[in-house]
Image (cartoon, helix red, strand yellow):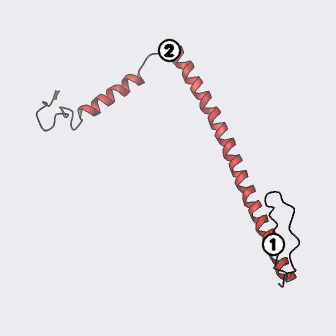
């Protein structure tokens, strides 16, 4: 098996193994090395279990928050519908009464006593 020279057009090509490149060979070697390791240290095993527990906790929290968000979204839609119905009811009542003029609001100025009442409106 020969690897092409660094100046040649196929410097990553490995000759004698069909069309396998040096990168593919390195990747295959590293995978087989990891897969064939004889033992995993107890520290690594404990870390893996701890990571699994954290992942499970985060998944549970995500599911809870997702359900809460869905409920809040549904509640908001219901409140909006109720608000729209109430607004429509008030508008209908105002149009049926025929009184669409409201008295002008009183805004106090420098804590002075209120002005005399305004003259009746013609609306």
Residue identifier under label 1: 104
**Splitting the image into 4 quarters, where does residue 85 fall?**
bottom right
Mark count = 2
Near mark 2 (Cα within 10 A), the count class, few <14, some 14-19 or many ≥20, is: few
Where residue 9 appears, as percent x and y from the top left, is: 13, 38
Question: Could you tell me which residue is drawn at 57 percent across and 19 percent down?
Answer: 46
Residue designated by label 2: 41
On the image, the x and y values in percent for residue 118 come to: 86, 75
Is 51 placed above or below 89 here? above
Task: State which quadrant residue 49 falls in.
Answer: top right
Residue 98 relative to residue 74: left or right:
right
Residue at image position (72%, 60%) is 77
Q: Quadrant of the C terminus?
A: bottom right
Q: Quadrant of residue 58?
A: top right
Q: Residue at x 14, y 31 (%)?
A: 6
Q: Residues within 10 Å of mark 1 (few under 14, many from 20)?
A: few
């Amino acid at each position: 098996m020969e690897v092409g020279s660094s100046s040649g057009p196929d410097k990553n090509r490995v000759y004698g193994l069909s069309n396998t490149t040096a990168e593919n060979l390195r990747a295959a070697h590293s995978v087989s090395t990891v897969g064939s390791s004889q033992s995993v240290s107890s520290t690594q095993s404990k870390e893996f279990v701890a990571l699994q527990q954290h992942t499970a906790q985060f998944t549970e929290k995500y599911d809870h928050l997702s359900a809460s968000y869905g409920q809040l979204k549904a509640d908001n839609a219901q409140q909006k519908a109720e608000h729209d119905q109430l607004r429509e009811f008030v508008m209908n009542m105002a149009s049926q009464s025929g009184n669409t003029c409201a008295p002008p609001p009183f805004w106090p100025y420098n804590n002075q006593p209120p002005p005399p009442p305004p003259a009746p409106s013609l609306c």
